[in-house]
Image (cartoon, helix red, strand yellow):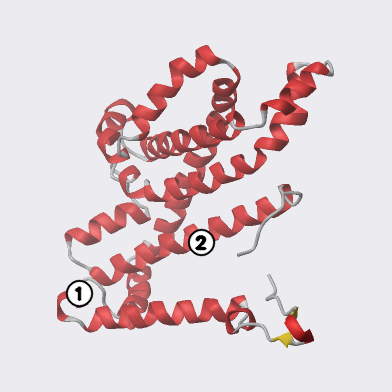
Amino acid sequence: MKTHTVMNEAAGGKKVKPRLVERIPNGGWLALSLLAALLFWTILSLIPSTSRSFPNIFLVTESIGTMMQRGVFWKDIISSLISVTSGFSIGFILSLPVAIVMAWYKPVRFIIEPWIQFIRNIPPLAYVPLVVISAGVGRTPQIIVITIATFLIMSITIYQGIKNIDPTLIKAAKVLGARDRDIFMKVVAPASLPFIITAIRLGTAVGLTSLIAAESTGAQAGLGMRIRALSNTFESSPMLLYIIIIGIIGLIFERLVKLLERRLTGWQEKRDV
């Protein structure tokens, strides 16, 4: 988004110059943020008590070659992407109808919502052993764990969005003779779309944060699995590299969600601060 350069009229007919914050483009702020992060990282790498946990950027960059030589770098990334995207997709497909039914029918809501809220407060790492006992080891339990975690957060988010739709709109549609299907397609769906986008954003984040728990199910490859393995051998450089990669993947997902949001909710008024 371009920086505002509009001159504001002040008292006495004088024009006020834009503030310094407004004159710096978004790309400039991004560069400053990156420099600040690198500076903070460098300071941590120089402090004796934190230098082992936060090796400098050169050591972390060198670890890319190390992991490639071991033949696991791309294998780990691809494995984790498959697990996260599969678990998220299944979680979204399940959460959408469940949220709609919960919001539309009170008996279903009273039965299902307490259990969703209950399980949502349990860390995925706690029920991983139960999933492994039921599904065995491999990719299947990884997808199940990520599916559960993403389903819980997305179903509640979508449900709250549908529940908070202005009831006047629904009543007006009923007065005009609209059927339940018409009300859902022409009133509920458009009004709840921003909340569905928010649910997707939260779901992708939860999917990544559940990765280490999901890949503790006897995984042979993956970012989360490799972080756990590297922590056992105290190899902090490649471990920090993999943590950064998870963050980068999260940023890519966020950009994709924003692109989807612009395309689907361009009609929604947004306020720039």
Q: Quadrant of residue 55?
A: bottom left
Residue occupying image coordinates x 64% and y 63%: 272
Q: Mark 2 = which residue?
A: 251
For the N terminus, the quadrant is bottom right
Q: Position of residue 124 (x, y in %)?
A: 32, 39
Q: Quadrant of residue 24?
A: bottom right
Labels 2 and 1 touching (C-beta < 8 A): no
SS label for mark 1: helix
218, 180: nearer the viewer: 180
Give me the C-alpha separation between circle 2 and circle 1.
26 Å
- In the image, residue 53 sits, relative to residue 127, either above or below, namely below
Q: Position of residue 215 (x, y in %)?
A: 33, 46
Q: Residues within 10 Å of mark 1 (few under 14, many from 20)?
A: few
Q: Which mark is residue 50?
A: 1
80, 197: nearer the viewer: 197
Looking at the rendered structure, the kind of residue marked 2 is Leu
Q: Visible in this render: residue 28?
A: yes
Residue occupying image coordinates x 28% and y 82%: 43
The count of marks equals 2
Asked whether, in this view, residue 16 is left or right of residue 162, the answer is right
Residue sitting at the far right: 176
Residue occupying image coordinates x 50% and y 37%: 154
- In the image, residue 121 sits, relative to residue 261, either above or below, namely above
Looking at the rendered structure, the kind of residue marked 1 is Thr
Q: Visible in this render: residue 71?
A: no
Q: Earlier in the sequence, mark 2 or mark 1?
A: 1
For the C terminus, the quadrant is bottom right
